[in-house]
Image (cartoon, grey):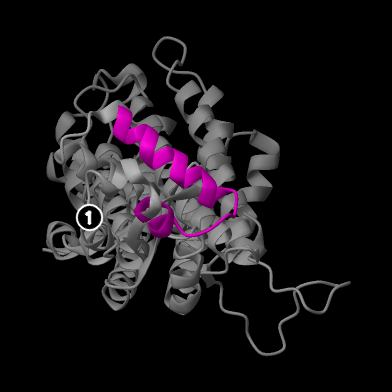
Amino acid sequence: MIPRYTRPRMAKIWEPETRFQIWLEIESHACDALAELGAIPKEAAEAVRARGGFDVARIDEIEREVKHDVIAFLTSLAEHVGEEARFVHQGMTSSDVIDTCFNVQLVRAADILIEDLDALLDALKRRAVEHKDTVCIGRSHGIHAEPTTFGIKLAQAYAEFDRARSRLEAARAEVATCAISGPVGTFASVDPRIEAHVAEKLGLSPEPVSSQVIPRDRHAMFFATLGVVASSVERLATEIRHLQRTEVLEAEEYFSEGQKGSSAMPHKRNPVLTENLTGLARMVRAYALPAMENVALWHERDISHSSVERMIGPDATVTLDFALARLTGVIEKLIVYPDRMRANLDRLGGLVHSQRVLLALTQAGVNREDAYRLVQRNAMKVWQGEGDFLGFLAADPEVGGALAEGELKDLFDLGFHTKHVDTIFERVFG
């Protein structure tokens, strides 16, 4: 985790103190269940809950000697609990603690990310409604296509992130499992009721079948989902970057008083936030592949996944949390230039209406191939800067033979392209 791209609430989930606290909760809940079943004295479970504690520095010290983090934790815990600590971790294996804890952390991280998406969705909806009727040019291949509205652009982003929210909820459910099944997952040394109790207390579901570890396909799906969300962040960030280019300048990031864009050129106002988001998205996606490679563990378990997850767990969630919050800020403060949008729309002298003319000619009895030829030959003159599209069409005898000048003018009405905006908004926002 790099402090520059870290928000404290998400970072706290991955701090050693938090991890060991979850470990303590797991062990305490397990002791409670063991005591209820009569497997350990109730006094022992009560002692663990009353005196259970740990010291991070002491755990690190012990681990340097024993080279095993769970044993180091249990030793530190025993130093706090005393004699009754001998009943802790009865029948359990390290993965029971580590895997269950990791899933608790991922669930908590997912909850924050879902809140982040809710904030982004709120911002996108507000700005989409604000610019529902702000007409701008739509582009395909980066080239002017036909008119749309800036509100539709934002509504499209809203719908995409709404899907992202649903995927993230599903990914959260995917990793919300608990395994307290002992060596190789057979429950030979720990009653399945212990797992059920711990799972309930932690808000998880018992893993149907674990092989001593929770199956990593669950985690692969989780991190792949984060990668897809990051890709949506990049898509919207890239759109804003393109709209901020000097030649376009239909929208731009907020530029605060005192902000400087370049060490060399004082005039610069660069899209630094959305460029940053593009880079952060690349990193989040990069964490998906090692998560998928973690699925293929040896037999019932190995620890090839462990070092990977110690890195990608914090890094992926922290980075996406920061990116979503930054994108929300960009959308909330985005500067929009409707006049520039209209100027760009008119830049090609009406060529954006070429399809309407094409279709009108076919409706008037001209076969499609001839209609396309007539429209294109007049359009290319405008493309080369020779004049006005409507004027060329009106002066073309072949076009005039099929469409009167008044009919041609009607085909250049922008309202034709925006007549279903309300329908789109109803579909997206309800």
Residue 53 located within the stretch drawn in magenta: no
Choose between 253 and 424: the one closer to the eye: 424
Does residue 125 appear to the left or right of 66 in the view shown?
left
Count of labels in the image: 1
Residue 385 located within the stretch drawn in magenta: yes
The quadrant in which residue 416 appears is: bottom left
- Kindly identify the residue that appears in the image at 68 percent across and 68 percent down: 270
The quadrant in which residue 66 appears is: top right
- Residue 214 image offset from top left, x and y in percent: 34, 28
Q: Which residue is mark 1?
A: 404
Inspect the image, locate mark 1, and give the three-letter code of the amino acid beneath it. Ala
Boundaries of the magenta span: 370-394
Instruction: Note whether 71 is above or below 154 in the view shown.
Output: above
Choose between 100 and 348: the one closer to the eye: 348
Instruction: Note whether 329 is above or below 44 in the view shown.
Output: below
Does residue 359 appear to the left or right of 322 in the view shown?
left
Image quadrant where one finds the C terminus: bottom left
Image quadrant where one finds the N terminus: bottom right
Residue 402 visible in the displayed image: yes
- Name, please, the residue furthest toward the right: 264
- Kindly identify the residue that appears in the image at 53 percent across and 67 percent down: 7
How many other residues sit within 10 Å of disc 1, few (<14), some (14-19) or many (≥20)?
Answer: few
- Kindly identify the residue that appears in the image at 37 percent across and 38 percent down: 374
What secondary structure predominates along the stretch shown in magenta?
helix
- Kindly identify the residue that appears in the image at 56 percent across and 72 percent down: 253
